[in-house]
Image (cartoon, helix red, strand yellow):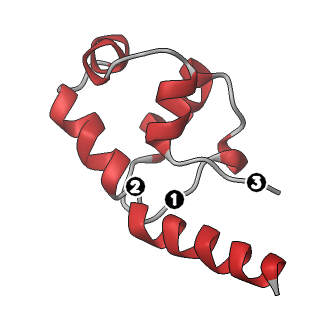
Amino acid sequence: MFQLSLKSARVNAGMTTKEVAERVGVHHQTIGKYEKDSSDISVSLLNELSELYQIPVDYIFLGKEYDLIRTIELKRKKEVV
């Protein structure tokens, strides 16, 4: 199963952080914060974002952005070998 960062999901939905923030009722800096580290996002906000971005919650990576990048890089290295 693949996973997307919250930022990737937002960009794929064609929205800015300000647009998302207005739709879910939080400050745009809060959206930016969770895009960098979603490990402590509330379940209710996660569900709202999932619905807004039209992707299942299971497809959203929860954690620090650099952990997702590191995981992807490791998978690519294994594929090359």
Q: Residue furthest front?
A: 80
Structural crowding at the residue carrying mark 1, measured as other residues with C-alpha within 10 Å and reported as few (<14), some (14–19) or many (≥20) = many
Of labels 2 and 1, earlier in sequence is 2
Q: Say which residue label 1 marks.
A: 62
**Amino acid type, label 3:** Phe
Residue 64 visible (yes or no)? no
* Residue behind mark 2: 38
**Along the line of sight, the residue nearer the viewer: 33 or 40:** 33
Q: Residue at x 50, y 66 (%)?
A: 69
Quarter containing the C terminus? bottom right
From the top left corner, tell me how far across and down residue 67 is, in percent: 47, 72
Quadrant that contains the N terminus: bottom right
- C-alpha separation, residue under disc 2 versus residue under disc 3: 17 Å
Lower sequence index among marks 1 and 3: 3
Total number of numbered discs in the rendering: 3
Residue at the image point whose x is 48% and y is 26% from the top: 11
Q: Hey, what amino acid is under mark 2? A: Ser
- Name above or below for residue 33 compared with residue 73: above
The amino acid marked with disc number 1 is Leu
Tell me if label 2 and label 1 are in contact, CB under 8 Å. Answer: yes
